[in-house]
């Protein structure tokens, strides 16, 4: 009899948790972790391309040292921040990490712009392969970040809405940081690689 009572109590508690949004928040938390892991994976993919890209450009345009240095420094800053799943639970660390990634993206965009001045560089097979990989990676980053944004929106809505917000407070579910407006704009303006434009004459 006691076992039946305990089983019934457990069943009733499970129904209560489900009805109050606990399961939705727990599943949402797992979805966010998976989405963020993919964002980190694509950021790492981009970072891994930088050294070879910089070295290739240096071979044809060593005089563009300032641009090359800024790319290297931006990569160093981006990779110095420990990219873990826990970043999504630390708004301040999340903000710093995203800002560093934005700086790297901007530096890479300037590097690609500079490459337009060097026809021999643009025709180099390795450079074309690296830039194609970079463009593909930027597209993957966009997709991964959009998935993360949607996962966060659903989770945060559940955490702050009544009555599920009561369950959130009880079990410690908190809002997670979202990409800021400037980050979302950045998503829509990923670096473009276009070698069909006429080359701009190099500065003397």
Image (cartoon, rainbow, N blue to C red):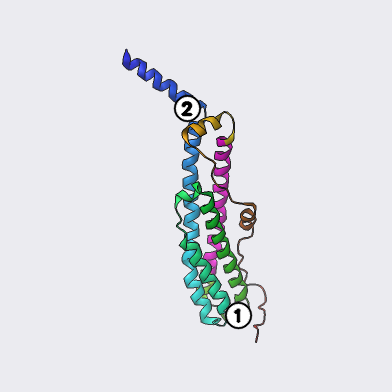
Magenta-drawn stretch contains 147: yes
Element on which disc 2 rests: helix
Query: Residue 195's spot in the image, x, y percent?
Result: 62, 72
Q: Would you say residue 129 is visible in this rendering?
A: no
Query: Residue 183's spot in the image, x, y percent?
Result: 61, 55
Element on which disc 1 rests: helix
Of 125 and 89, which appears nearest the observer? 89
**Residue ID at (54%, 49%):** 91
Q: Is residue 102 above or below residue 18?
A: below
**Residue ID at (48%, 28%):** 18
The segment highlighted magenta reads: 131-159
Query: Residue 75's spot in the image, x, y percent?
Result: 50, 66
Q: Quadrant of the N terminus?
A: top left
Nearest to N terminus: mark 2 or mark 1? 2
Q: Of circles 2 and 1, which is in front?
A: 2
Q: Is residue 120 above or below residue 51?
A: below
Magenta-drawn stretch contains 67: no
In the image, taking residue 162 as reference, residue 14 lies left or right, namely left
Alpha carbon separation for disc pair 2 and 1: 64 Å
Q: What's the mark number on residue 119?
A: 1
Query: Residue 43's spot in the image, x, y percent?
Result: 50, 59
Q: Quadrant of the C terminus?
A: bottom right
Q: Would you say residue 9 is visible in this rendering?
A: yes
Of 52 and 152, which appears nearest the observer? 152
In which quarter of the view is residue 121 placed? bottom right
Q: Which residue is mark 2?
A: 17
**Number of numbered labels in the structure image:** 2
**Residue ID at (48%, 51%):** 87
């Amino acid at each position: 009899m006691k076992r039946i009572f305990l089983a019934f109590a457990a069943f009733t508690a499970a129904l209560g948790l489900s009805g109050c949004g606990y399961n939705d928040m727990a599943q949402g938390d797992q979805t966010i972790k998976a989405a963020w892991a993919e964002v980190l994976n694509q950021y790492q993919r981009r970072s891994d391309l930088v050294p070879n890209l910089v070295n290739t450009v240096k071979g044809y345009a060593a005089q563009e040292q300032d641009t090359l240095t800024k790319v290297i420094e931006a990569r160093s800053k981006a990779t110095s921040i420990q990219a873990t799943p826990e970043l999504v639970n630390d708004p301040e660390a999340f903000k710093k990490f995203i800002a560093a990634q934005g700086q790297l993206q901007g530096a890479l965009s300037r590097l690609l712009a500079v490459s337009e001045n060097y026809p021999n560089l643009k025709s180099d097979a390795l450079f074309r392969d690296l830039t194609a990989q970079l463009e593909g990676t930027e597209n993957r980053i966009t997709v991964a970040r959009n998935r993360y944004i949607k996962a966060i929106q659903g989770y945060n809505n559940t955490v702050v809405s009544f009555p599920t917000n009561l369950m959130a407070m009880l079990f410690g579910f908190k809002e997670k940081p979202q990409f800021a407006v400037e980050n979302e704009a950045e998503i829509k303006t990923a670096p473009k690689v276009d070698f069909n434009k006429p080359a701009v004459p190099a500065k003397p």
